[in-house]
Image (cartoon, rainbow, N blue to C red):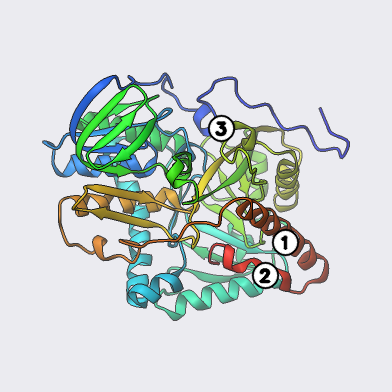
Amino acid sequence: MNGPDGVADPPPASDNPWSRSLWLEGVVEDLTPREQLSGDHTCDVAIVGAGFAGLWTAYYLKAADPSLRVTVVEAEIAGFGAAGRNGGFVSAGIAGSGGRYARRSGWDSVLRAEREVQRGVDEIGRVVSSEGIDCGYKKSGALTVATTEPQVQRLNARVEAKHRFGLGSEDIRLLNADECAELVRGAEGVLAGTFTPHCARVDPARLARGLAAACERLGVKIYEQSPAELLRPKVVQCRGGRVLADVVVRATESYTIRERAERRSFLPLYSLMIATEPLPQQTWDELGWQDGMGIGDVRHLYYYSQRTVDGRIALGGRGAPYRLMNPISTENEQDARVYERLCETLREAFPAAAQARITHHWGGSLAVPRDWCMRTTFDRTTGLGFVGAFGGHGVTAANISGRTMRDLIFGQTTDLTSLPWVGHHTRNWEPEPLRFIASRVITKTLASSDAYEERSGRPAKRAWLVKPFLPPS
């Protein structure tokens, strides 16, 4: 059924309460929840949240010390949140602002962080291979394209900045239009681009569910449908019981704001996605899109896309409205205006797939800290740890955070424990309704900036007005 503008209505959400995305719907094994926590349970390390951050922390702790008793409690099912709904980019590039990290730790630490994130892409591939996780991991790099002159300027500035502090052309390089066409022939209107080899494609839900199974094989205990109501030193109070532990690690990302004391710690920003039906080989031949390579752009409301394991285009972007009264809810997982914009982006960027049927539309919330910088913290006195604040870079950043938290808990001083986000602290967001007003103004400003640049071919100065509230370019 089509709306008045000719755009097909968004496909309905799945009736299965756990299948909140294309990825979760396609998970091979049963999504029936694991055992719920009941009564008191004692362990050495309790981790709250079975997303990427919590699962990687559990995996590396147990792999390092098989005698350690590690327990994970999850409000829904493993991979239910952002881990099972994201774009599936195992990408390099640090989560946060290099300049902000450098003010605290220096530019050498930022370069070390960039290198560690690059290694993180390969480390995830190593674990996927060694644990036999069937998640379609394929490392073919990422192409970022520009279709207007202002976008070309932003790409040039980004590459110059990366090269200036130590990355080389083997890490990220500029491409002209012809070079972009060698990587994807069917992308329309491309003027220039950048390419990095440090990126892989995955089915994120299969990765999360496979990682949970790997944790269990090592002896990690996972309780599902066991929401934590209170975290404090040595105790996690859940709806059905308590977990008593020497170490308690919070890995709840955007869902952290559901705890009263943490309501202003993050802006729960939604990123929405669509997916086409599986495309015929003739369309892929026309597109010339190498399997495993991610493609995105540098509009202010940018898109990101991957070629899925089963031959679809999965494409996502920002711009979902922030809701004052219920910032995290199923109602926020679909939005008609964002859906139309994503469909239009698909048609414009990949005209060979313009007639493909859209089979899925979904979304998930990510945790945006006030300065967009991730953090990994551990207080040895209280035994409380935190991993998260990834701001949309969680697939790779969570792996690094899990390894770092392992070292912090074991009291080891390593290259990981000296990375610039270790011990980083961020002030809270402004109280409501200021946060609500700001989020709406930001979205409208970015959308109007894109429209102005496409119409005029000149950079939109208005975008600078909201730059302090945006992730680093």
Picture coordinates of residue 322, whole percent (x, y): 64, 46
Task: Report if the CB atoms under discs 3 and 1 are less than 8 Å apart.
Answer: no
Task: Report if the CB atoms under discs 2 and 1 are less than 8 Å apart.
Answer: yes
Nearest the eye: 280 or 161:
161
Q: Residue at x 37, y 26 (%)?
A: 226
**Mark 3 / mark 1, whichever is N-terminal:** 3
Q: Of the numbered discs in the image, which one, if any, rests on residue 22? A: 3
Vertical order, 165 against 473 (above or below) = below
Picture coordinates of residue 72, whole percent (x, y): 29, 33
Q: Amino acid at mark 3?
A: Leu
Distance from label 3 to label 1 (Cα)? 30 Å
Q: Quadrant of the C terminus?
A: bottom right
Q: Amino acid at mark 2?
A: Leu
Residue 316 visible in image:
yes
Q: Secondary structure at mark 2?
A: helix
Number of callouts = 3
Task: Report if the CB atoms under discs 3 and 2 are less than 8 Å apart.
Answer: no
Picture coordinates of residue 207, whole percent (x, y): 40, 37
Q: Secondary structure at mark 3?
A: helix
**Mark 2 sits on what residue?**
465
Furthest toward the right, the residue is 4
Distance from label 2 to label 1 (Cα)? 9 Å
Q: Secondary structure at mark 1?
A: helix
Vertical order, 129 against 31 (above or below) = below
Q: Residue at x 74, y 47 (%)?
A: 341
**Mark 1 sits on what residue?**
445
Left or right relative to 56: residue 91: right
Nearest the eye: 22 or 66:
66
Vertical order, 10 against 420 (above or below) = above
Left or right relative to 131: residue 14: right
**Mark 2 / mark 1, whichever is N-terminal:** 1
